[in-house]
Image (tube, helix red, strand yellow):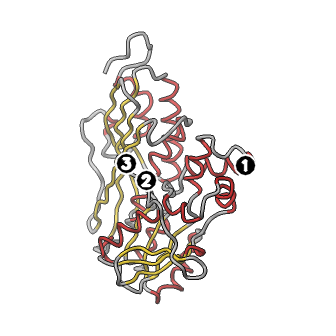
Amino acid sequence: MSAAKGSGRPGEFELIDRYFAPLAAKVEGTFGLHNDAAVLPVSRGERLVTTVDTMIQGRHFLDCPPDLVARKLLRVNLSDLAAMGAVPFGYLLASAWPLDLEESWIAAFSEGLARDQGIYDVALYGGDTTGTPGPMTLSLTAFGRVAGQAVLDRGSLVAGDDLYVTGSIGEAYLGLRALRGDLEELPAATREALVGRYRLPEPRLAVGQALLQEGVARSALDVSDGLAQDLGHLLEASGVGAEIDLPAVPFSAAALEGLAALDLPPQSLLAGGDDYELLFAAAPAQAEAVAALAERCGVAITRIGRVRAEAGLVVRDAAGAEVPLDARGWTHF
């Protein structure tokens, strides 16, 4: 693609050479991004795990610093790999840049990718770069490795299993509400903490890898579209139901402040989305192993309920009464 008329921005190949080829430098199989395909390194006894996510400006991210857009795009994919217990090593990037976008935005975007490449030991293996008259569209495909034949299969829940979640739930949703101007009465530090959780999730890679390698969990997924909705995917795939103990769900102090400011019940955060925490099921006999894993990984892991034979999801309050869910989670359409 040539530079947009009057924009002064470089064309496709100049952008690639300037901002994205350095992200693939010295990585075997990338050919400096000068080939139309890459060679992915998978050793004998390993299997390739892959996932893809797309983010569209105005729908999946609002007015956000470009480096954080890049880092979130990479991290939401790494979170999918975490739910499979995979070790990430690389990714492909397809980018459709608005024709009037300043080159400085793309430069900052590539700097964000470079920063997280260093944190997560991954590299860019290729992709596609073009311009668009519509909103910015960014699609990233991530690759990871798993050894052996074991998998964290969504269809493996068994009645009586305990349900666990890492970290805390609901802050990202409230961060989005803060960006929309709904939480102006909160202290600035609280709003910033909530917005930070929305803009920059933490993929729980160490936890996911340990769950798989140590055989602790039966199945797992990352909470992206809301805990209630994503748990529903696990239940449907396994043909079982579940009960969630609402008082056990981990909500941070900042999240509780946001709930109070919006006059929302706590169950509303089960539908918020963008948490990117791991939700997994383990047999009751694994309780001590889960606790040890949490301490070793430095990540809080909380038991929030159990799997039951009866279909459907039930949320209960401290008295054991069923709590209604007005919504289950985010929909992309």
Total number of numbered discs in the rendering: 3
Residue at the (40%, 80%) spot, across then down? 215
* 303 vs 331, nearest the viewer: 331
Residue at the (35%, 73%) spot, across then down? 235
Residue 21, image quadrant: top left
Residues packed near mark 2 inside 10 Å, few (<14), some (14 to 19) or many (20 plus)? some
- Element on which disc 3 rests: loop
The dot on residue 186 is 1
* 299 vs 193, nearest the viewer: 193
Q: Which residue is mark 2?
A: 330
Q: Amino acid at mark 1?
A: Leu
Q: CA distance from mark 1 to mark 3?
A: 29 Å
- 17 w.r.t. 315: above or below: above
Residues packed near mark 3 inside 10 Å, few (<14), some (14 to 19) or many (20 plus)? few
Q: Amino acid at mark 3?
A: His
Image position, residue 105 (x, y; %): 51, 28
Q: Answer yes or no: do the residues labelled 3 and 2 have beta carbons within 8 Å?
A: yes
- 129 w.r.t. 273: above or below: above
Image position, residue 118 (x, y; %): 52, 48
Q: Amino acid at mark 2?
A: Trp
The dot on residue 332 is 3
